[in-house]
Image (cartoon, rainbow, N blue to C red):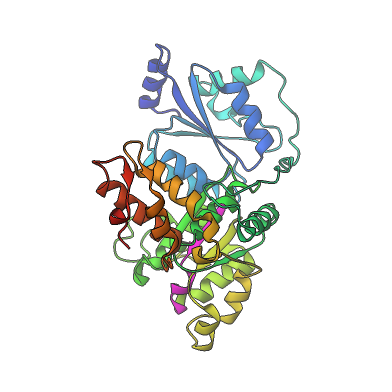
Amino acid sequence: MITTMLREAVAKSNVGEPLDLLIVSTNDLLRKHLAAKLRSERWRVQEASSGAEALQKTAFSSMSVVLLDPTLPDLNADEFQTMLHSQSPLAEVLPLNPQTGRPMIDDFCNDPIALELSQALDKDQIRSSFGPVVAPPRLPSPTQLPSMIGDTPAMKQLYSTVELVARRDTAVLLTGESGTGKDLVAQALHELSPRRTKPFVVINCAAIPEALLEAELFGYVKGAFTGAVQSRIGRIHSAQGGTLFLDEIGDLPIGLQSKLLRFLEQGEVQRIGSTDTLRVDVRVIAATNADLRRLISERQFREDLYYRLSVFPISLPPLRDRMADLPALAHAFLRIYSTRDLVLSREAMETLQQHGWPGNVRELRNVIERACILASNGWSIQPEHIIL
């Protein structure tokens, strides 16, 4: 039943204020067909391919209508509606027939929104069946990764490797010293993959207290523990259809490693306080600067989890092994942090090239930022502005 407040929203839309409409279905063809038919001055249309993605979108906008394919891959329809109404209490949910794409609105034939949507869809013959999603075209081979700089042989090899593995759902383990750009490579793996239009969810395993990390990763149901006043999906779940980046995986508590392993093996998530398992389609990328084999020998990291994560290992070179890239990197950071047309003097560049860079590219970035501040009253960065 359309609520009184929603009827008032319809009245407002009649005088020029569009309403927000969300189409939720795992079928890309169905979503795009409905969105093309309904998008107008009357409706601001958004799309979501899963319950988790839909809840992310409704958290930042007040939805008026949700067209819901009840065959969601991650949440059952009743649970989705309960969680939806906790953050968008005025949203009206209309179920969709996933085969025909027609709203199942027989019981709502007197409601103005349902009638209006039905009439809009009737303007053109709707498809009788929506087939499988067509795979996206292959991306051209990149000359370098997004946001990364360098053309040394080590970097060219990295670009080629990332471009190859990005097309697949293979689990990737990124290793390398701190500051080498593992987060940028993870982002590039996502952006060059068929999942690039879906969420890219990052969780730093070292930054969240162990007591909270399980709830953050797997979610929980209402009443699971003190303070759980409503159900919540976890970060794994919120990456539905996209990519989950587990940074600093070497710091994952040993007690959570078996639960993460089960997710990797079975593609299922069990929230705290629930006996139900939910299917999740997520590509996993992990990163660490730790020696995982040493942690395995010290019984701080599970060997079976290591092999699940490192199906395709990629090691990032330290800056000292690609010093020919340093000038390009330094000038790129100079463009970012300089508030005027500062230049690097030859003597300053020589100072940079003589350093060992234990902190890698991150350390270089910080050095250039400091130098830009110290040289802000002049026109060039001199050796005295380089603080190492």
Instruction: Give the image quarter of residue 70.
Output: top right
Q: Quadrant of the C terminus?
A: bottom left
Residue 128 place in picture, x, y as percent:
75, 30
Q: Is residue 111 visible?
A: no
Residue 175 place in picture, x, y as percent:
54, 68
Please identify the residue farthest to the front as the structure is shown: 347
Please identify the residue farthest to the bottom as the structure is shown: 298
On whether residue 207 falls in the magenta region, the answer is: no
Q: Is residue 228 visible?
A: yes
Residue in front for this viewpoint, 333 or 281: 333
Q: How many marks?
A: 0
**Position above or below: 222 against 87:** below
On whether residue 251 falls in the magenta region, the answer is: yes
Please identify the residue farthest to the top as the structure is shown: 15
Q: Is residue 178 left or right of residue 377?
A: right
Residue in front for this viewpoint, 133 or 315: 315
Instruction: Give the image quarter of residue 157.
Output: bottom right
Residue 357 place in picture, x, y as percent:
43, 65
**Position above or below: 18 against 189:** above
Q: Is residue 222 left or right of residue 266?
A: left
Residue at 44% of width from left, 23% of height from top? Answer: 19
Residue 11 place in picture, x, y as percent:
39, 16
**Position above or below: 250 against 228:** below
Residue in front for this viewpoint, 48 or 296: 296
Q: Is residue 84 left or right of residue 155?
A: left
Q: Is residue 242 left or right of residue 379?
A: right
First to last magenta residue range: 242-254
